[in-house]
Amino acid sequence: AQKITQTQPGMFVQEKEAVTLDCTYDTSDPSYGLFWYKQPSSGEMIFLIYQGSYDQQNATEGRYSLNFQKARKSANLVISASQLGDSAMYFCAMRERNAGNNRKLIWGLGTSLAVNP
Amino acid sequence: DAGVIQSPRHEVTEMGQEVTLRCKPISGHNSLFWYRQTMMRGLELLIYFNNNVPIDDSGMPEDRFSAKMPNASFSTLKIQPSEPRDSAVYFCASSPGRPQETQYFGPGTRLLVL
């Protein structure tokens, strides 16, 4: 079963508007971390934001925020005031903390975001 | 601070040749990961090291692939012999470990095997 689900293969947003990219996860581990990465067309993978399962507040990093709804097992990325440079592929990933020495991330398949001028 | 450094950035080779990809992790990071990304299969973890020791190589496709980490500042991924289906972007990432364990990626090596 997929542990990270990104249901939106592609999204469009108008420049300067906000956009939400969905991510749901499945784990029985009470301790876990959730990550979002951006991959522009140039190919590099850029870390955006992190949310720990015990964090009391939703994570924010500049124009990025994470809408963390633990009961629903969702960790949606919100990008405010979209810019043309936000056009990229966005990946959600999870690391289960109590997986012992296992430091692997479990990755979603990604959402392609296009920002229209 | 310098990020993860990978070389070469691009590699074009012929089937059957040996390919060596190199990675220098961020100083102080104790985990290193090798990924492969293709359109068909997405992002796949090939192998990762913790404190220079290979922990999980279950993603290594076959014996043609090998990876080493002789010290904390250098790792190689070798393909011998290379095949056209190995064409992909290979990423190296490093992580400082707990508590957050964020992985920071290098720019990738674009490999084309003809």
Image (cartoon, rainbow, N blue to C red):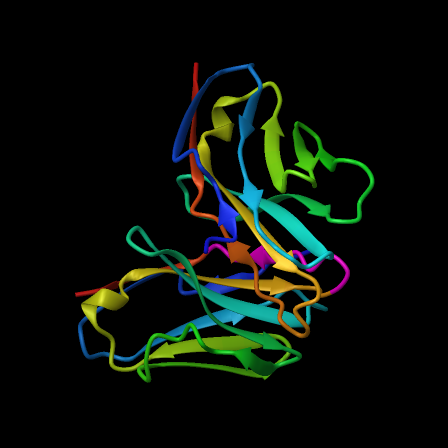
Image check: B110 left or right of A7? left
* Residue A2 horizontal/vertical position (percent): 46, 53
Tell me which secondary structure the magenta stretch mostly adopts: loop
Query: Can you name the residue that lies furthest to the right here?
Result: A56
The quadrant in which residue B35 appears is: bottom left
Location of residue A73 with respect to A21 vertically, above or below: below
Q: Bounds of the magenta span?
A: B98-107
Q: Is residue B33 magenta?
A: no
Judge by depth and name the residue closer to the eye, B110 or B34.
B34
**Residue B93, picture quadrant:** bottom right
Query: Is residue B94 rendered to the left or right of residue B43?
Result: right
A96 with respect to B58 (left or right): right
Name which residue lies at 43% across and 33% down: A8
Q: Quadrant of the N terminus of chain B?
A: bottom right
* B99 to B47, vertically: above or below: above
Which quarter of the rendered picture does the C terminus of chain B lie within? Answer: bottom left
Q: How many marks?
A: 0
Whole-percent x, y for residue B28 in the image: 72, 69
What is the x, y in percent for residue A7?
A: 44, 37
Q: Residue at x 58, y 76 (%)?
A: B49
Q: Residue at x 45, y 30 (%)?
A: A87
User: Residue B79 is drawn in which quadrant?
Assistant: bottom left
Of residues B36 and A53, which is closer to you in this image? A53
Q: Is residue B103 magenta?
A: yes
Residue at 75% over, 64% down = B98
The spot of residue B42 in percent (x, y) is 37, 53
Instruction: Looking at the picture, tell me which residue is in the foreground, B56 or B70.
Output: B56
